Image (tube, rainbow, N blue to C red):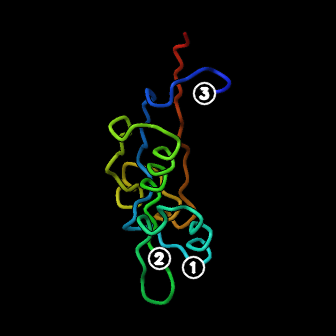
Amino acid sequence: MESELGANVSQLLAAIGPAIGPCCYRVDGEVFREFKKFSWAEKVFHPLKGGSYLLDLPRANYYQLREAGVKEENIFLAPLCTSCHCQNFFSYRAGGGVVTGRQAALLCWRGK
């Protein structure tokens, strides 16, 4: 966005909507190893017995935005886990792979 549109990353706003949370998103060691390349990887994984982990995926997105230059105060995280709140949101995992839905992303650009 900087090079193509002339956006100032430090002025961007980002909202990370409801997603599966670290309370429900269990992953295996292979996923953990793939994330090890990021300096913040240890902050988003919580080890469990048996070599699996709980992954805080919204927080991982937060750290990626921070690395890209988005200011901390300009990043908003929805505090809802879609798996825990599957009565309000679609959750592939909570629905056993049967109940699915779609999410949307909205981008707005006010150029120079």
Q: Is residue 94 above or below residue 89?
A: below
Q: What residue type is labelled 1?
A: Gly
Which residue shows up at 50% across the image and 47% down it?
67
In the picture of the structure, the residue carrying the numbered disc 2 is 53
Q: Circle 3 sits in a helix, a strand or a loop, which is it?
A: helix
Estimate the spatial distance between the alpha carbons at disc 2 and disc 3, rounded to whole Å: 35 Å
Label 2 near label 1: C-beta < 8 Å?
A: yes
Q: For this rendering, which residue is in front, 39 or 31?
A: 39
| Circle 2 crowding by C-alpha within 10 Å: few under 14, some 14–19, many from 20 | many
In the picture of the structure, the residue carrying the numbered disc 1 is 29
Which residue shows up at 54% across the image and 19% down it?
109
- Where does the image place residue 101, in percent across and percent down from the top left? 54, 48
| Circle 1 crowding by C-alpha within 10 Å: few under 14, some 14–19, many from 20 | few
Which residue shows up at 48% across the image and 72% down it?
26
Snapshot quadrant of residue 22 = bottom left
Please identify the residue farthest to the bottom as the structure is shown.
50
Q: Quadrant of the C terminus?
A: top right
Label 3 near label 2: C-beta < 8 Å?
A: no
Q: In this view, does 11 lie above or below 72?
A: above
Q: For this rendering, which residue is in front, 100 or 61?
A: 61
Estimate the spatial distance between the alpha carbons at disc 1 and disc 3, rounded to whole Å: 35 Å
Please give left or right for residue 62 compared with residue 106 in the image.
left
In the picture of the structure, the residue carrying the numbered disc 3 is 2
Q: Circle 1 sits in a helix, a strand or a loop, which is it?
A: helix
